[in-house]
Amino acid sequence: MTPAAASSYGADESGLICGYRLGPGRHGQDIGSAEAAQWLAARRAGASAHGEFLWLHFNLAHTGSQPWLAQAAQLPEPFFEALKEDLHSTRIERTDHHALIAVINDVHFSFSFEPSEISTLWVHVDRHLVVTARRHALRSIDALRTAAKRGDTIASPIELLEALLRAQADVLVRIVRDVTARVDEVEDELLANRPDARRAKLGAMRRVLVRLQRLLAPEPAALFRLLQHPPAWIDEAGVLALRQSTEEFSVVLRDMSALQERIKLLQEEIAARVNEDNNRSLFVLTVVTVLALPINLIAGLLGMNVGGVPLSEEPHGFWIVVSIVTAFTVIAGLVAWRSRRRD
């Protein structure tokens, strides 16, 4: 494969992955970047759109995507500023051009519960155009593409944004269910006295959930400002739909919080059992050391090569020493056993 072909894999020369011409009462119609540029130029010239709008999905890893968005789509500057920001928290804001800029975080299409497999989707929404742009293949946008290919009717740009938010919420619900199933397995193994079987995976799942919750929780201030003062082209039904989709996000995030708390409790239970096993092993080692102390002490004293060693001339001295060592060992064992029972 040539370098040029590799760079444009999955997109055309402008970085467009897919484009659809949508509107009330009609199925999605595929559209390319050249035709989209002509359609947008006609709209700016005052041609009637008859309620139609475009949805264009771009690959930002393609070098031609941002120049096309700036020249052909003429997106406002806040969209490009959002692309350059390091702050990737989920938010929907209104611009001075009566458009919406959304920053949405989603998981990669091949998500395998790694914190690095979470990426950002940037969205521009106005009366006649919806632009979505990403650097990695994401699950929610792929579900929306499938719906458009299937012929589902999407009547307005705000309905497309709502469908995107709902698709992302569905992806998160599936992630929560998958994590719940994995946590159930770990809990079953814990009840079967096998706490070390998947102990390391609990920490990885908890880190992923924490990062998802931190990135996916919508900024309440920006969302409140949008819902209180939406652009004029968004009707009351659209505002209500946005409010409902954000409420679905809140439900999923609460489920994530509850799942994180459950994982934390399991980690604490596993740590308590491990500490108990360590304490038991340490107790056994201490008892063995205590039981061996009398014989080691007496053997050391009687083994000194000096004069005056007691019982050296006694015919039964060996058995006397054995009796003394046995008595002290039994006493030490009883003391250790009673101490263990009190604990």
Image: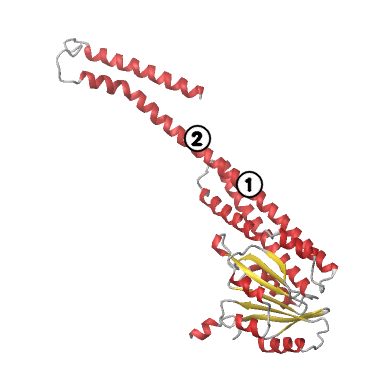
Which corner quadrant of the image does residue 99 belong to?
Answer: bottom right
- Residue at image mark 2: 276
- The amino acid on which the numbered mark 2 sits, given as a three-letter code, is Glu
**217 lies above or below 159:** above
Q: Which numbered dot is residue 261?
A: 1
Which structural element holds mark 2?
Answer: helix
Which corner quadrant of the image does residue 57 belong to?
Answer: bottom right
Between residue 210 and residue 288, name the one nearer to us. Answer: 210
For disc 1, the neighbor class at 10 Å (few under 14, some 14 to 19, many from 20) is few
Q: Residue furthest front?
A: 96
Q: Position of residue 190 (x, y in %)?
A: 56, 43
Between residue 113 and residue 65, name the one nearer to us. Answer: 65
Q: Residue furthest right?
A: 236
Q: Position of residue 70 (x, y in %)?
A: 64, 82
Residue 6 lies left or right of residue 73; in this view the side is: left
For disc 2, the neighbor class at 10 Å (few under 14, some 14 to 19, many from 20) is few
> Which residue shows up at 77% across the image and 71% down it?
158
**220 lies above or below 98:** above
Residue 319 lies left or right of residue 183; in this view the side is: left
Measured Cα–Cα span from mark 2 to mark 1: 22 Å
Which sits earlier in the primary sequence, circle 2 or circle 1? Answer: 1
Q: Position of residue 4 (x, y in %)?
A: 51, 86
Which structural element holds mark 1?
Answer: helix
